[in-house]
Amino acid sequence: MSLPHAILTALLEKPSSGLELTRRFDKSIGFFWSATHQQIYRELGRLEQSGLIRSLPQPPSRGQRKEYEVLPAGRAALVEWVAQPQDPKPIREPLLLRLRAAATVGGRGLAEELERHLALHERQLAEYLEIEQDDFPVERVDEENRLQHRVLSAGIGLERFWVAWLRETLSVLREEGPGALRADGRG
Amino acid sequence: MSLPHAILTALLEKPSSGLELTRRFDKSIGFFWSATHQQIYRELGRLEQSGLIRSLPQPPSRGQRKEYEVLPAGRAALVEWVAQPQDPKPIREPLLLRLRAAATVGGRGLAEELERHLALHERQLAEYLEIEQDDFPVERVDEENRLQHRVLSAGIGLERFWVAWLRETLSVLREEGPGALRADGRG
DNA sequence: AACTCCATGTAAGGAGTTACATGATTGA
DNA sequence: TCAATCATGTAACTCCTTACATGGAGTT
C-alpha cells in the first residue's frame, strides 16, 4: 500500500501529469520506490475516484495532458499513513539466493555476475554522491532538508554496503583458487 | 522467478515435504527469501509438472505427507540460473518513503516508529550474530561453508547498516528540537 | 500523407497475500 | 468421541510487469 502514498507525496511536492510523475519516479522518488507509467495511471484513477486528488480543469479527451493536485483529504490520508506502524519487510535478494545455490551446485560464472553487480552499485553510489554534493551543501539546513538528506544517506549507505560486500565476496572466491567459480574455471 | 529456484536449492540440501520446506523458509533460507506455505505448495506442484522434481512414492491422498526430491533436470535448471545475469532491483523501502512524506507534511509520531524499527533490527542483528557463532567457527572452511558464510555476512551487514542509520536519523530528529516529530510534540 | 513524439491508457499474466477448506493423526 | 494438531491444499484478491493500443500535435 505504498504506491498511492508515494504519488500523494510527489503531487504535494508539485502538481503533475501522469507522464511527469513517471519521469520523477525514474529519478528522485524512484530511487527508493519505483513505478511504471501503467501503475501510475491506474493509481491516479483510483486516487481521483476516492476523492484524495483531483484533476485540474483541462480538456478531458484521450491523449491530452491531465494535471492532478492533492485535495485536503489526500493530505490527511498521507499524514495518517506516515506514523502508522508497518513492520520492515524481510530481505528479498535473489543474489544471496544464487550464492546459496552456488554453495550447493557450484557457481560457474557467478564471479562475473558479482563483478557486474559491483560495477552497477559503484555507479549508483557515484550518482547518489553527486546528488548529495549538488542538493545538500552544508548551508541551508531546515528540517525538511535534513529529512530528505537522511533519505539520500540511506541510499548512499546501502550502496556502500553492497560495494564492500561484493568486493569481500569476490576476494573470498579468489582465495578458493584462481577462477574457482568463474565460467572459465573448473567449477 | 526466484521462488522455484529457492525451493530447488532447499530440496537439494535436503529432500522435504511441503510443510518442512515452509518451516525452513521461516528460518535459514527465509532470512533472504521468504515464502508462505500456499506459495510453496503451488510451486511444488508446478515444479513436479515441469519434471524438475518428483514426489517420492507415498500415499497420494490428501492430508498425507508428500516428500519431494530434485531430478537431474532440476539441478541443471538451478545451475543455469545461478550464473544468469539479473540486474539488482532498485530499493523499495516504505520507511524511506515515509520519511520523505514527513519532510513535506510533517512527521508526527514518526520518531516512535523509527525507534520501533531500530529495536527490530537490533534483535535481528543479534540473531544473525548468534547463528554466525554457532555455524561458522574458524575451523572447517571449505568452499561451501565460505559461501554460506558470505550470505550470512550480507544479512549481518545490512542489519548493522539499518541500526546505524536509524540511530543517526533519530539523533537528527532530536536536534530539530526535542519532540519535533514525536506524536506528543508540535509537529 | 507519413513519421515521430507526447500522453494516456488496456489486457494479460505472474507473484505474493489473506482467508478459508479438507483430510489424517494423536491424545484426552 | 471430541478437540487439537499436522499436512496439504483452494479461492479471491492485490500488486507489479510486459506488451500492446489509441489519440493528439508537430514535422517533413
Image (cartoon, coloured by chain):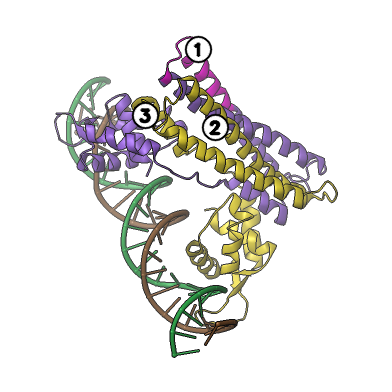
Chain colours: A purple, B yellow, C brown, D green
B73 vs A21, left or right, is right
- Residue B120 part of the magenta-drawn span: no
The magenta-colored residue range is: A123-143
Discs 2/3, front: 2
Name the main secondary structure of what is drawn in magenta.
helix
Q: Is mark 3 on a helix, strand or loop?
A: helix
Residue drawn 70% across and 45% down? B129
Amino acid bearing label 1: Pro
Q: Is mark 1 on a helix, strand or loop?
A: loop
How many numbered discs?
Answer: 3
- Residue A141 part of the magenta-drawn span: yes
x and y percentages locating residue A109 in the rendered image: 69, 45
Badge 2: few (under 14), some or many (20 or more) residues near its Cα, within 10 Å? many
Q: Which of A142 and B40 is in front in this view?
A: A142
Would residue B14 be seen by someone viewing this image from the given angle? yes
Q: Which mark is residue A137?
A: 1
Amino acid bearing label 2: Leu
Write down the quadrant of residue B155 in the picture: top right
Residue drawn 35% across and 39% down? A81
x and y percentages locating residue B174 in the rendered image: 49, 24
Q: How far apart are the two marked residues, 1 and 2, measured between alpha carbons? A: 22 Å
Question: Do the residues bearing badges 1 and 3 touch, measured as CB atoms within 8 Å?
Answer: no
Q: Name the residue under label 2.
A: B166
Q: Which of A142 and A105 is in front in this view?
A: A142
Q: Which mark is residue A23?
A: 3
Q: Which of marks 1 and 3 is nearer the N terminus?
A: 3
